[in-house]
Amino acid sequence: MKRKAYPNYKASGVEWLGEVPEHWGVKKVQFLSQRSEGGVWGEEPNFNETDTIVLRSTEQTVDGFWKIEEPALRSLDNYEKRKALLIAGDLLVTKASGSDFHIGKTTIVSTDIEKRGCCYSNFMQRIRLNFSEYPRFVWYFFNNSIVREQFQYYSNTTTGLQNLNPSLIGKVLLSLPPSSEQQSIVAYLDREVTKIDSLIAKKQRLLALLAERRTALISKAVTKGLDSKVKMKPSGVEWLGEVPEHWNTIRLKHLCQIRYGIGEPPEYVEDGVPLIRATNINEGKIETKNLVKVDPKDIPYSRIVWLKTGDIIVVRSGAYTGDSSIISEEFSGSIAGFDMILSCTKVFSKFISYGLLSKYLKDGQIYLQKLRAAQPHLNAEELGECLVFFPPPPEQRSIAAYLDRETAKIDALSAKVETIIERLKEYRTALISDAVTGKVDLREAV
């Protein structure tokens, strides 16, 4: 269907909203709500039928959906249960967070959540709309940048902290059509957004398959070599099978010098040298999205924390423990953060860097080592004990060159898919924004 504008518009009286359809209104959230109240937390659970599921802000995704995997059980008294019991159509807004991305994220209560007798935590604000408003329309609006930016503005400029309260939430402005028109817009958005989300999910599955293909390609090359006719021998690792007969086996500590990065970094600066942190390391690549810089004069350590071309940096702890990347010429002279540095002086570092991304090292030995601690963690001794299979230097170079070429093809395809996903997300956002602010007339779209 061709999208068209409304025949007549009027000034909304709100600079950032601009004009709205002539028959639409502009209202503050406080005038749309019959109830607006914080949640409860109660006491430790009794682990019996008297416990209540209390939903938390951590179970709300940034884009306004639920991700309820291990819901919290709490012991609530009768007053708390009555006060915080959720019904279908309730909107829950995150009002406290350490991140601008999470402040104001809003989920809608489904009939399934209502049937489970769920309540909600005190980091969230429940808004129950007047009967004249359609909750799903307001949910679409709340998760649009127009409202989320208002939440961020009020939380930062009014309180000085990333917190919202009922008064600040009530100040947020929405443009609203009549209730029947809200339902028409929601029906259109539900249909079109579902199509977009389905396409995004397919592209994301393709990305996952490409990542699996990349890992499998690397794993085969660094454990079997490139010559399918070469004579093989048992590797000594049951699940790995055989390796080329002429390859050697040695512990990583005998091939590389392993040292630690800076640990606690100095203050970040606008103009300085890059500080490579765990958040910058992604499957053999250095990501620049969250790259920070430090003043080299503030580095109180010796030259051991400085990175040079060919060094390998390995994530030492956290969710991405064991991930690694070789340092290219672009990042030579950077500072290593908390993570470990491998300098491979006796062997071709490019081959080792690929080995660290393979199943037999990253998903095998390193995975087992990092699980020994209460939280995922890896130290130099544990990393150094990992066994490495490696061929003579000329063969290492051949394998590394082959993997450079083949992984570049996969990475280029992955980059194209990621671009498509970003464009679909942008289109989704624009579609919702245009619909809920009256930029397009959808009264005949359903």
Image (spheres, rainbow, N blue to C red):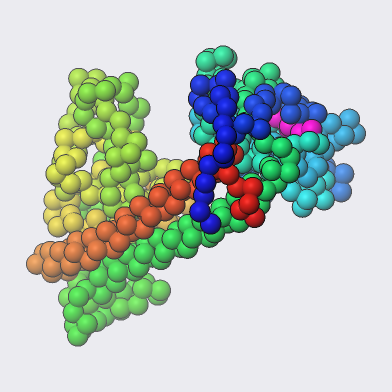
Residue at 57%, 27% (x, y): give it.
Answer: 10
**Res 275 seen here:** yes
Above or below for 249 versus 25? below
Residue closest to the eye, 83 or 167: 167
Residue at 22%, 82% (x, y): give it.
Answer: 228
Residue at 56%, 24% (x, y): give it.
Answer: 11
Residue at 35%, 52% (x, y): give it.
Answer: 419
Left/right of residue 144 with respect to residue 75 in the rendered view:
left
**Res 93 seen here:** no
| Picture quadrant where residue 233 is located | bottom left
Above or below for 69 versus 172? below
Q: Position of residue 136 (x, y in %)?
A: 68, 43
Left/right of residue 431 with respect to residue 191 in the rendered view:
left
Q: Position of residue 201 (x, y in %)?
A: 50, 59
Query: Which secondary structure type mostly characterizes the magenta part of the structure?
Result: strand
Above or below for 227 versus 416? below
Viewport quadrant of the C terminus? bottom right
| Picture quadrant where residue 82 is located | top right
Above or below for 166 versus 377? above
Q: Position of residue 176 (x, y in %)?
A: 66, 33
Q: How many tags in the picture?
A: 0
- Give, as a single range, the part of the protein colored magenta: 125-130
| Picture quadrant where residue 181 is located | top right
Left/right of residue 73 with respect to residue 24 in the rendered view:
right
Residue closest to the eye, 426 or 13: 13
Q: Position of residue 336 (x, y in %)?
A: 26, 36
Residue closest to the eye, 396 or 22: 22
Residue 312 highlighted magenta (yes or no): no
Residue closest to the eye, 436 or 246: 436
